[in-house]
Image: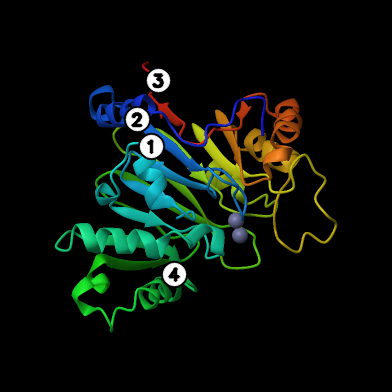
């Protein structure tokens, strides 16, 4: 773990603070990013794999315990509108069946969760999640109605009432997407690379972001010569932040014991790097001219 103390579960006060803070984003005009988990593939007790909330209503990747983490940190899983899967490795979608189940049980007539993800895999993973819930055996659960699948290809971009969303291909052993969210209220930009090997073309997708969230799976480095798992280490993550001229860099997706060493290496290249703690919320406020 980093020099910061680990915060595996929030106090009641912290949960309430999150609730109040996110609820108040409309008044203070901020974009809020909450780190539900920051761990690599197999988290330890009290942690979760890398998954993130935007304004309490958009989820990027569904870590093992996403639905429980949201509640622990003071968020309502029924308030989620969209899930964006960066890719369909287990640590990024294991929480999906539980999330669908929670919503189908607690809001059977509620709007579906719109699930975006790589065109090659997203439908398959959502279907498998529904199979796990035995939808034909338990039709009364009506889990099919709880999801709306939207496949995306690299380069796809669109706008809804909240964000402009742009995508690029990350470099990973399975199809993977980098997402760039521009908050239409605030103009703030958050970029998520998901898991990726170093890829110079990602600079365009993260350029000028107020917050870049990227992975440093190989810790302080170096990356193995083969890099067959398609990941970065701290120097490559920090260099992406430099090349993209981003404001802040959040490092995620590495072993707990390596986090402080990883951060130290990254900060030598990009001083405004940090390792977020679980449950932490970053608020991006527009710069007033
Ligand atoms: Zn992966
Ligand atoms: Zn991963």
Tell me, for residue 122, which label it has, or none: 4
Distance between the Cα atoms at labels 4 and 3? 37 Å
Q: Earlier in the sequence, mark 1 or mark 2?
A: 2
Of helix, strand and loop, which one carries label 1? Answer: loop
Task: Specify which label sits upstream in the sequence, 4 or 3.
Answer: 4
Q: Quadrant of ligand 1?
A: bottom right
Does residue 153 sit above or below 270 in this rendering? below
Question: Which of the labelled discs sits on residue 287, or is there none?
Answer: 3
| Residue farthest toward the right in the current orientation of the protein | 225
**The disc label shown at residue 18, or none:** 2
Q: Residue at x 24, y 29 (%)?
A: 26
Separation (CA) of disc 1 from disc 2: 7 Å
Q: Which mark is residue 73?
A: 1
Q: Mark 2 and mark 3 in contact (Cβ < 8 Å)?
A: no
**Residue that appears at 76% across and 64% down:** 228
- Quadrant, the N terminus: top right
């Amino acid at each position: 773990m980093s020099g910061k103390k680990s915060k595996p579960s929030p106090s009641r006060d912290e949960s309430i603070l999150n609730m109040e803070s996110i609820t108040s984003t409309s008044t203070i005009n901020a974009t809020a990013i909450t780190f539900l988990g920051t761990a690599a593939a197999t988290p330890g007790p009290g942690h979760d794999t890398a998954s993130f909330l935007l304004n309490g209503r958009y989820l990027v990747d569904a870590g093992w315990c996403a639905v429980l983490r949201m509640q622990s940190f003071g968020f309502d899983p029924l308030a989620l509108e969209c899930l964006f899967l960066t890719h369909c490795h287990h640590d990024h979608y294991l929480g999906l069946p539980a999330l669908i189940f929670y919503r189908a049980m607690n809001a059977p007539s509620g709007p579906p969760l719109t699930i975006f993800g790589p065109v090659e895999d997203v439908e398959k993973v959502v279907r498998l999640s529904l199979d796990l819930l035995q939808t034909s055996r338990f039709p009364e659960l009506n889990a099919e109605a709880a999801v709306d699948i939207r496949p995306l290809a690299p380069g796809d971009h669109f706008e809804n009432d909240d964000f402009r969303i742009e995508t690029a291909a990350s470099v990973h052993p399975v199809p993977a997407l980098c997402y760039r969210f521009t908050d239409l209220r605030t103009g703030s930009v958050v970029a998520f690379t998901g898991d990726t090997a170093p890829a110079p073309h990602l600079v365009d997708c993260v350029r000028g972001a107020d917050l870049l969230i990227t992975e440093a799976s190989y810790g302080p480095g170096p990356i193995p010569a083969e890099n067959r798992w398609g990941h970065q280490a701290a120097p490559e993550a920090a260099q992406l932040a430099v090349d993209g001229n981003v404001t802040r860099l959040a490092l995620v997706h590495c072993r707990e014991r390596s986090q402080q060493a990883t951060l130290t290496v990254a900060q030598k290249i990009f001083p405004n790097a940090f390792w977020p703690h679980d449950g932490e919320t970053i608020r991006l406020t527009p710069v007033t001219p």
